[in-house]
């Protein structure tokens, strides 16, 4: 690697302190050149992992008053020598110190380069490295917990198990090709079948966890639909507990989608409020309607609103048609205006569905709705401590691996010659290797770490 890199590792903007981080062979030299104690001593390299008080000084000019720490590799994040300088947390102080590092020969770190080095030097496996982004970007404590679980290496362990099983398969196949006596072959075919079934189960389990992982990471994608004036904006406001969406009496005022994140305890709803679904010639609104349908396609849950103080009309019925086969909570709003009988009639209409009677105006019935939303995440057998795939790239790799494993399973069942099965095993190993690191290319690595921020 050679080059010594430097970056501001804290977020932009003002803060109490900000940190400039250096990593690489020359980190200690640079630290010694830049830092002076009160007694004009350079950074003491014997004091490994000790904070030292002093100034960043250039030609007798004090750039900032700082704390500085030298950390000797390999016991560091990157496994290289590192220096961290705790400056005053303003843009000017930080960029002056960073600029000084660069003038002394450090190179500005690329996004995620510290973590990339941690990976390349064996400090983290790839799934751990990728979990670092999830930790930083976590929108809920549950998402954070999942990030921590992945950072512990638990997910990497699971991927390695899959890889080991594939290698076992590969070994059996090679043995068979080399010693094709019949009795061994029969024995091995049974083993092959067992291992490929087991592999299929493991990979499927991980793939299935991805929808929960996605909800964890991005929030439960929630779309609110209903014809104009049924109370969509009002419901959104109640859920948000503040007046953010515009509420009016004129049908069709919420023309644009509004996106909000709502935290219900530690589960996050990613709410998309769309324009009312209705037959309309109005151009602007028509775009809104199309958008609603598109949003429904992506939603984890649809909150479909109806005005229970009026009988269902054609527009409501059109909406009901659109909702068929989707995951929907039917919400009968304006409970305060309904006279009971109609309410009952509607309830019959929605029989067998998940129905909530609320008043967005009086904030009645909202708690039940919120509880049901929370349960979407904590469903049945799902243990919130379970590993979940939260990374799209990893999901893509798993899908490809699954395809190869299915081919292996079929081939074993159909008594296809061993050397043909070997091709599929090789493919599966190549795919999973993109996570375990065995078949990573520079290109994939670059893509992974470019999602990071600079300084991480
Ligand atoms: P949207 O067009 O579906 O977003 O509907 P709004 O939220 O803008 O509400 C339309 C009108 O219905 C407003 O005047 C709200 O105050 C009123 N409204 C909403 N919810 C209720 C409710 O539960 N009870 C009553 N009485 N009025 C409501």
Image (cartoon, grey):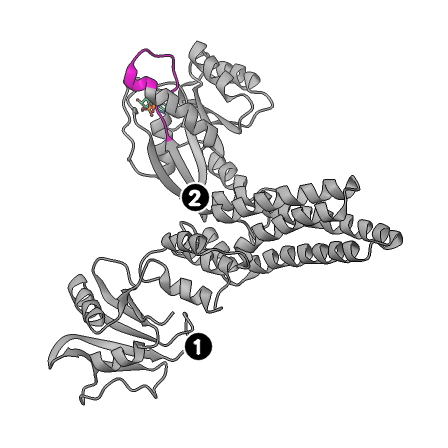
- Where is residue 354 drawn, in percent x and y? 55, 28
Q: Which residue is mark 1?
A: 74
**Helix, strand or loop under label 2:** helix
**Helix, strand or loop under label 1:** loop
- Where is residue 266 drawn, in percent x and y? 45, 49
What segment is highlighted magenta in the picture?
273-286
- Where is residue 46 drawn, in percent x and y? 34, 88
Residue 4 in the magenta stretch? The answer is no
Q: Which residue is mark 2?
A: 218
Please give the name of the residue rendered at 46% of the width and 64% of the height, measured from the top-left corner. 119
Front-most of 339 and 449? 449
Task: Tell me the quarter of the image containing the C terminus.
Answer: bottom left
Task: Tell me the quarter of the image containing the N terminus.
Answer: bottom left
Please give the name of the residue rendered at 42% of the width and 29% of the height, measured from the top-left corner. 295
Front-most of 401 and 372? 401
**Residue neighbourhood size for the residue with mark 2, other residues' Cα within 10 Å, grouped as few (<14), some (14–19), many (≥20):** some
Sequence-wise first label, 1 or 2? 1
Q: In the picture, residue 385 is in which quadrant?
A: bottom right
């Amino acid at each position: 690697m050679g080059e010594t890199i430097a970056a501001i590792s804290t977020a932009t903007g003002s803060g109490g302190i900000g940190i400039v981080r250096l990593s690489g062979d020359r980190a200690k030299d640079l630290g010694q050149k830049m830092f002076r104690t009160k007694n004009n001593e350079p950074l003491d390299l014997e004091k490994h992992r000790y904070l030292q008080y002093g100034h960043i000084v250039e030609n007798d000019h004090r750039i900032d008053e700082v704390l500085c720490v030298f950390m000797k590799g390999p016991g560091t994040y990157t496994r290289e020598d590192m220096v961290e300088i705790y400056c005053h947390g303003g843009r000017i102080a930080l960029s002056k110190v960073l600029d000084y590092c660069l003038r002394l020969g450090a190179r500005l770190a690329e996004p995620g380069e510290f973590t990339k080095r941690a990976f390349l030097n064996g400090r983290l496996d790839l799934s751990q490295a990728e979990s670092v982004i999830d930790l930083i970007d976590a929108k809920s404590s549950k998402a954070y917990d999942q990030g921590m679980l992945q950072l512990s290496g638990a997910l990497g362990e699971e991927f390695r198990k899959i890889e080991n099983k594939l290698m076992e398969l590969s070994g059996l196949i090679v043995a068979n090709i080399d010693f094709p006596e019949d009795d061994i072959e029969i024995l091995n075919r049974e083993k092959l079948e067992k291992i490929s079934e087991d592999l299929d189960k493991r990979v499927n389990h991980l793939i299935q966890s991805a929808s929960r992982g996605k909800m964890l990471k991005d929030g439960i994608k929630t779309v609110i639909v209903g014809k104009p004036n049924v109370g969509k904006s009002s419901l959104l406001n109640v859920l948000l507990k503040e007046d953010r969406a515009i509420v009016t009496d004129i049908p069709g005022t919420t023309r644009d989608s509004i996106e909000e994140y709502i935290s219900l305890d530690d589960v996050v709803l990613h709410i998309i409020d769309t324009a009312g679904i209705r037959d309309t010639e109005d151009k602007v609104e028509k775009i809104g309607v199309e958008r609603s349908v598109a949003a429904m396609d992506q939603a984890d849950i649809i909150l479909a609103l109806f005005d229970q103080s009026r009988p269902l009309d054609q527009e409501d019925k059109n909406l009901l048609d659109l909702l068929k086969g989707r995951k929907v909570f039917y919400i009968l709003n304006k409970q305060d205006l309904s006279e009971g009988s109609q309410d009952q009639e509607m309830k019959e209409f929605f029989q067998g569905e998940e129905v909530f009677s609320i008043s967005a105006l009086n904030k009645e019935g909202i708690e039940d709705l919120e509880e049901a939303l929370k349960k979407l995440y904590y469903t049945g057998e799902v243990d919130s401590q379970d590993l979940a795939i939260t990374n799209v790239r990893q999901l893509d790799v798993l899908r490809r691996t699954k395809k190869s494993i299915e081919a292996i399973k079929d081939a074993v069942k159909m008594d296809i010659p061993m050397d043909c099965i070997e091709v599929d095993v090789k493919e599966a190993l190549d795919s999973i290797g993109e996570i375990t690191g065995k078949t990573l290319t520079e290109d994939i690595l670059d893509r992974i770490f470019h999602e990071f921020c600079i300084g991480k």
